[in-house]
């Protein structure tokens, strides 16, 4: 028995599920201007809209308003979907539907973004999708700005104005079922191959110091102690500690250069 889910007054168990072949057939008819096929396809994909709405349970917007926004996104997806892309309709539609839902949520926030900026951001998102579809790669700010005939800083400002906190595991690009995650585009400046090589050289250089020199460097730079504190602990004068520290650092520097 199919699991019954009811949201926004709609019982999803009564919605028809389309087979892949039925989807393709309806989409082709829609491209030919068949309004009945468009209506049927939209109704059969309401479940997709409802599944997205449920991702925003804490939104301070009524479920009906979110549903209406989601349906706008669905209809835009239907009207703009290119059957020659070779991707599933849901893959194309989900970002569009979520975008419309988030627009409604943002519009209800205390911090409001002007209509003109939201419109620019929407045009930017559309242009980015078109560019990435054409060149099969991630669109750059320069390409988006050139397509819309605006400055790059306007593209950045518009996107920043509508941006929401995201997960590092959110996909930013998808090709043939392989997702490129946000974390894949973030570099680690602390753990590069160059830094790793430097650490190996440093460890090798320190290993060649005398035990006393190692102790002084450890206490000085790892434990953060002053030369006076070190001198009282190891039984040497502050001047001797200073001389040993300088010699040790000079020796390490010579060996790693």
Image (cartoon, rainbow, N blue to C red):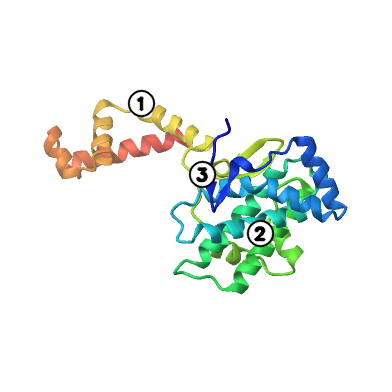
Pointer 1 or 3: first along the chain: 3
- Of helix, strand and loop, which one carries label 1? helix
Q: Position of residue 50 (x, y in %)?
A: 58, 48
Of discs 1 and 3, which sits in the foreground? 3
Distance CA(mark 1)–CA(mark 3): 39 Å
Q: Position of residue 139 (x, y in %)?
A: 70, 53
Distance CA(mark 2)–CA(mark 1): 67 Å
Location of residue 67 with respect to 190 vertically, above or below: below
Residue bearing the label numbered 3: 168
Location of residue 28 with respect to 65 vertically, above or below: above
Residue bearing the label numbered 2: 72
Residue bearing the label numbered 1: 207
- Of helix, strand and loop, which one carries label 2? helix
The label shown at residue 251 is none
Q: Residue at x 71, y 59 (%)?
A: 126
Dots 1, 3 in contact, CB < 8 A: no
Q: Number of labelled discs?
A: 3
Is 94 situated left or right of 108 in this image? right
Q: Position of residue 57 (x, y in %)?
A: 46, 51
Front residue of this view, candidates 223 and 152 = 152
Of discs 2 and 3, which sits in the foreground? 2
Residue 224, image quadrant:
top left
Is 182 situated left or right of 213 in this image? right
Dots 2, 3 in contact, CB < 8 A: no
Q: Residue at x 65, y 54 (%)?
A: 96
Q: Residue at x 72, y 44 (%)?
A: 89
Pointer 2 or 1: first along the chain: 2
Is there any visible trace of residue 171 in the rendered image?
A: yes
Is 166 situated left or right of 174 in this image? left
Pointer 2 or 3: first along the chain: 2
Report crowding for label 3: few under 14, some 14 to 19, many 20 or more residues within 10 A (C-alpha). few
């Amino acid at each position: 028995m199919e699991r019954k889910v009811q949201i926004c007054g709609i019982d999803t168990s009564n919605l028809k599920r389309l087979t892949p072949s039925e989807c393709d057939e309806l989409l082709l008819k829609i491209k030919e201007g068949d309004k009945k096929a468009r209506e049927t396809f939209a109704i059969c994909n309401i479940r997709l809209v409802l599944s997205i709405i449920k991702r925003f349970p804490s939104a301070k917007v009524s479920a009906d308003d979110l549903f209406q926004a989601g349906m706008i996104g669905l209809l835009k997806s239907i009207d703009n979907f290119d059957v020659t892309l070779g991707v599933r309709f849901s893959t194309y539609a989900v970002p569009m539907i979520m975008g419309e839902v988030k627009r409604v949520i943002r519009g209800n926030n205390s911090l409001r973004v002007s209509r003109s900026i939201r419109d620019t951001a929407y045009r930017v998102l559309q242009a980015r999708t078109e560019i990435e579809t054409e060149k099969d790669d991630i669109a750059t700010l320069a390409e988006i700005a050139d397509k819309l005939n605006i400055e790059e800083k306007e593209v950045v400002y518009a996107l920043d104005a509508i941006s929401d906190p995201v997960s590092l595991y959110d996909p930013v690009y998808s090709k043939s079922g392989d997702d490129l995650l946000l974390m894949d585009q973030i570099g680690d400046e602390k753990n590069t191959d160059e830094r790793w090589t430097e650490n190996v050289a440093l460890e090798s250089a320190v290993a060649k110091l005398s035990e006393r020199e190692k102790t002084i460097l450890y206490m000085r730079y790892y434990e953060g102690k002053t030369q006076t504190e070190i001198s009282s602990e190891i039984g040497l004068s502050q001047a001797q500690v200073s001389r040993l520290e300088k010699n040790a650092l000079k020796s390490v520097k010579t060996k790693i250069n």
